[in-house]
Amino acid sequence: MAKWIASNQRTFKKTGSYYLTHIAVAISVAYAVTGDFASSLTLSLLEPSVQAVVYFVHERFWSSSRRDGDVLPQGELGIQGQA
């Protein structure tokens, strides 16, 4: 498991960054609609949490479904030694 986490470190970091950005946007939009910060925070935590997991799975699926002509930079998505 530790090897799998290490090999996917970049995707985990990218997912975390996306998660925090998504929560900030969701709170802002929910506050604009409700006018209540507590409600905005509550409403904004569930969806981005689920979306972060879906995003990670999507990234892994996308990277594993590359066509032969697709080229990624060295080490992209934590895959060492593959271009």
Image: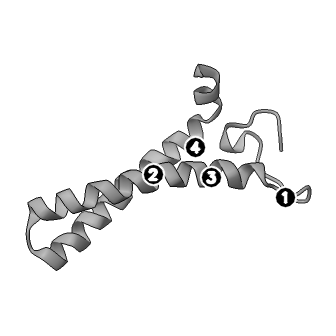
Sequence order check, earlier mark of 3 and 1 = 3
Mark toward the start of the polypeptide (1 vs 4): 4
Locate the N terminus and report the quarter of the image it occupies. top right
Q: Amino acid at mark 2?
A: Ala
How far apart marks 4 and 3 lie (CA) works out to 8 Å
41 relative position to 38: left or right: right
Q: Disc 3 versus disc 2: distance between alpha carbons?
A: 11 Å
Q: Could you tell me which residue is drawn at 66 percent across and 47 percent down? A: 60
Which labelled disc corresponds to residue 52?
A: 2
Q: Residues within 10 Å of mark 3 (few under 14, many from 20)?
A: some
Q: In the orientation shown, which residue stands out farthest toward the right?
A: 68
Asked which secondary structure carries label 2, the reply is helix
Contact, mark 4 vs mark 3 (Cβ under 8 Å): yes
Q: Are marks 3 and 1 in contact (CB under 8 Å)?
A: no
Q: In the rendering, which numbered label is found on residue 61? A: none
Q: Residue at x 64, y 22 (%)?
A: 3
Residue type at numbered disc 3: Glu
Residue receiving disc 3 = 59
Q: Which mark is residue 70?
A: 1
Q: Residue at x 61, y 36 (%)?
A: 8
Picture layout, residue 78 above or below residue 32? above
Q: Nearer the viewer, mark 3 or mark 1?
A: 3
Q: Label 1, label 4: how many angstroms apart (C-alpha)?
A: 19 Å
Q: CA distance from mark 4 to mark 2?
A: 11 Å
Q: Position of residue 5 (x, y in %)?
A: 58, 29
Q: Is residue 39 left or right of residue 71?
A: left
Q: Amino acid at mark 1?
A: Asp
What mark, if any, has residue 11 been given in the picture?
4
